[in-house]
Amino acid sequence: MVLIALAGLLGAAYLIYVVGFGAVADAAISVGWFGFALLWLYGAANFVLLGFAWWLLVPPYDARGAVTFAWARAVRDSVGDVLPFSQFGGMVIGARAVILRGVSRVVTFASLIVDVTVEMVAQIALTILGIVILVVHLPGQASNSTVVQTTIIGIVVAIVSAGAFVVLQRRGFAALEKVAERFVPAAAAPAAAVSEAVAKIHAAPWPMAGAFVLHFLGWISTAFATWLALKLIGQPISFAEAIAIESLLCAARSVAFFVPAAIGVQEAGYAVMMPLFGLSPEIGIAVSLLKRAREIALAAPVLLSWQIAEGAHAVGRKPANTPTGDA
């Protein structure tokens, strides 16, 4: 994992060298402190939005639950964005943050499984929207673009994968329980409990529909960050164009989920996509670096709060609370 992260870092550094460090730095610095503060506030708001999507899957709905899942989502994304872990590592640590707040392990992992699935479906919807926008905006180039053709193939694979994941949640857990009973008897009971909790979440379609809407808005908000960053740099584009750029970039990041923080992948994606809309590659890399800086500024207090919570738990000073949800 460290070697992959290092390779991505070297790739990003090479891109910056090729397009010119001075041009990239000038563009990134031009947003100023006020502009950077706006980007930071957007990121914090997005943590809350995505946390609420997760929270909708875990009734009852109260203030404590809202805070728990908003904070856990912040931890989950911060780990994936700035630490040398894959997206999967961020999910595991995000689940750990929920458990620290008193939610049962069964409910935590069941809701995480469903939340990841709903978020995947919302991302597929965003990518399809982005392809449509790109084809309308660049009717001649888009149809022949290798990026677009590859993304369409990726969408098909993602739809099949999402469908298989849903089927596994609804029917596949029974088979996994049997395997666990035979080979790892101690894991059979937890597997059965998680299966039951997942089935309970699937039995309530409206919370899942609400989670989908919030996740879709969360994906759309990533385009807002790109639109805002470009406007602050002085290179504005339309919001629809920003959606097209972010949809394809998010798809690329998902394919490269094993690359910690998508280092290099994100920079290359922006450098390739920006020229399609009349902007230079260095502007794309500048936007990427701004997002990296914002992620670090957001992650520092979030990860510090997580470490404080872990420390309090380790020494037995965790405050008394009532678990959210039923096992």
Image: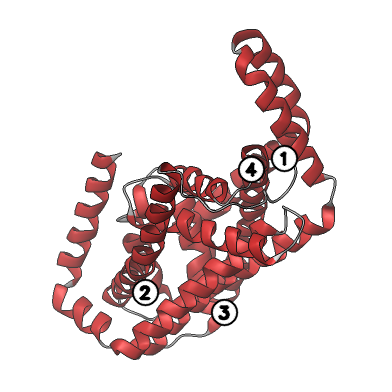
Task: Please tell me in which quadrant of the rendered image residue 270 appears.
Answer: bottom left
The quarter of the image holding the N terminus is top left
**Other residues around mark 1 within 10 Å, as few (<14) / some (14–19) / many (≥20):** some
- Which residue position is annotated with label 2? 275
Cα distance, mark 3 to mark 1? 30 Å
Cα distance, mark 4 to mark 2? 37 Å
Cβ–Cβ under 8 Å for marks 3 and 4 = no
Q: Residue at x 33, y 70 (%)?
A: 297
Q: Earlier in the sequence, mark 3 or mark 4?
A: 4
- Which residue position is annotated with label 1? 166
Does the image show residue 81? yes
Q: Earlier in the sequence, mark 2 or mark 3?
A: 3
Q: Secondary structure at mark 2?
A: helix
**Other residues around mark 4 within 10 Å, as few (<14) / some (14–19) / many (≥20):** some
Cα distance, mark 2 to mark 3? 16 Å
Q: Secondary structure at mark 4?
A: helix
Cβ–Cβ under 8 Å for marks 1 and 2 = no
- Which residue position is annotated with label 3? 240
Q: Residue at x 61, y 39 (%)?
A: 105
Q: Residue at x 52, y 85 (%)?
A: 238
Q: Nearer the viewer, mark 3 or mark 1?
A: 1
